Amino acid sequence: VVDFSRLRVVLVGTHNPLNIGAAARAMSNFGFSHLRVVHPYEAAFREARSAVGASSLLSTAEEYENLSDAVADCSLIVGTTTLRNRDLQHPFRLLPEGAGRMRDHLSHGNVALLFGSEKVGLSVDDLSRCHWLLRIPTREAHPSMNLGQAVSLCLYELVRDATVEPQPALSRPASGADVERIAGLLFQALQLSGYLGEDSGLSAEQKIRRLVLRLNLSAEDSQTWLGILRQIVWKCEQVKNV
Amino acid sequence: VVDFSRLRVVLVGTHNPLNIGAAARAMSNFGFSHLRVVHPYEAAFREARSAVGASSLLSTAEEYENLSDAVADCSLIVGTTTLRNRDLQHPFRLLPEGAGRMRDHLSHGNVALLFGSEKVGLSVDDLSRCHWLLRIPTREAHPSMNLGQAVSLCLYELVRDATVEPQPALSRPASGADVERIAGLLFQALQLSGYLGEDSGLSAEQKIRRLVLRLNLSAEDSQTWLGILRQIVWKCEQVKNV
């Protein structure tokens, strides 16, 4: 059974309180309840909450300092974008197909659906935490959508065919927190072994995170990989200390 | 052939200039061009037109004194509503089915899609001009939608099936030989790091091979993992040789 309460709508860096309110309203229209905001611009979140007619959904929205905390309990992380950025090597899915995949996942795990700021969308760092990207099929000539409308479209598409049977999950997928830990350990091992330079920075970290996400680890296997990587890091540190 | 230029989006009695702008933006996102406004509230239309970033679509929008003039050239008139008002004895169609019917009509005639004012929607008089009513499937408990979002949803559903592209082929999977090499290197790294005992045998090897197979690596990623594992094995061997 698809459990829509497992969806977290995550607004990252939203500037306009009206857009936070519009997202909350769309969620209420289509029966979703978990709204999270990550470092919203200045007082946007406070203003949205105190606006006349602000929903109860908005009052229970959670505020996060960073994206990785906001998606830690989610095993599928989807970023929305209206542009095809082929450099990122991320799989793209158009909304109708992508919503079907999210629905399947909601029958057994939490899904985070990310929306970036009004001006620039999601950052490269935000995108590096996404399993795949969701593209709303707008015209190439005018791809940029209003934020509230984008939220509304995605949620509508999720419930549109609510009667469709979900695909059975083969195994429970790894949580966002586990993927983060695995990517962190792998990054450490690659620095210690000399595969990455000691001064390798954010873009290398993002590349590693995407590499780990593409493994689509199960919760069970992620524990095995954590053990393997801890041991390798421990061993590589010995060399350093010799 | 469906001719989307035959659709007229008709906003009736809209109060908020931001909503007129949002409707115009959604039309541009999905490739529709004919916007008509009927007795918009006070200066809403003028304000919307003069707003920073107002689209060219908005500048060619037409203003009408009454609804009957605004739909005079249309042979199908559809009113949107989020409520089931059974008294009106109008046929209701949910958005997915209704959009299909409008699409069929657009292959031979003009269609007017009507949106009422933010507070009260379409009047009984407005509805009396409609062939049938389109209902966006919102929750009964919270049916009332943001106007810009409602426009956006209807237009998305109209073009939805036209935009579905064939999915690009999934990435080429890793060859059996590469999986074998990766499993071999991983096994070596696990022995060198002490994760596996030096005397670990066939069953441990098989376990590692299954672990690697479950990663479902692409051909491209398998090259990256080979490089990573070679470096880790090299580093772990250094400890042994010290």
Image (cartoon, coloured by chain):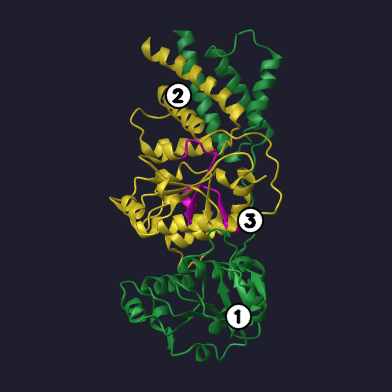
Chain colours: A yellow, B green
Where is residue A47 drawn, in percent x and y?
Answer: 31, 54
Q: Could you tell me if the residues under marks 1 and 3 are in contact, i.e. CB atoms within 8 Å?
A: no
Q: Is residue A49 left or right of residue B205?
A: left
Whether callout 2 and callout 3 share a subunit is answered: no
Is circle 1 on the same chain as circle 3?
A: yes
Q: Is residue A73 magenta?
A: yes
Say which of B11 and A153 sits in front. B11
What residue type is disc 2 on?
Answer: Ala
Query: What secondary structure is marked by label 2?
Result: helix
Above or below, comparing residue A240 to residue B169 in the picture:
above
- Cα distance in 3D space between marks 1 and 3: 25 Å
- Chain letter, disc 2 residue: A
Residue topped by disc 2: A189
Q: Residue at x 61, y 36 (%)?
A: B217
Camera-side residue of B201 and B92: B92
Q: What residue lies at 56% left-to-right and 91% top-to-bottom?
A: B73
On the image, the x and y values in percent for residue B138 come to: 57, 61
Contact, mark 2 vs mark 1 (Cβ under 8 Å): no
Looking at the picture, does residue B191 appear above or below residue B227?
Answer: above
Q: Looking at the picture, tell me which residue is in the foreground, A154 or B133.
A: B133
Circle 1 packing at 10 Å, graded few (<14), some (14-19), many (20+), is some
Q: Is residue A44 left or right of residue A161?
A: left
Residue stretch rendered in magenta on the structure: A71-98
| Label 3: which secondary element | loop
User: What residue is disc 1 on?
Assistant: B3
State the quadrant of the C terminus of chain A: top left
Chain letter for mark 1: B
Q: In the figure, A236 relative to B3: above or below?
A: above
Residue A150 screen position, x and y as percent: 48, 60
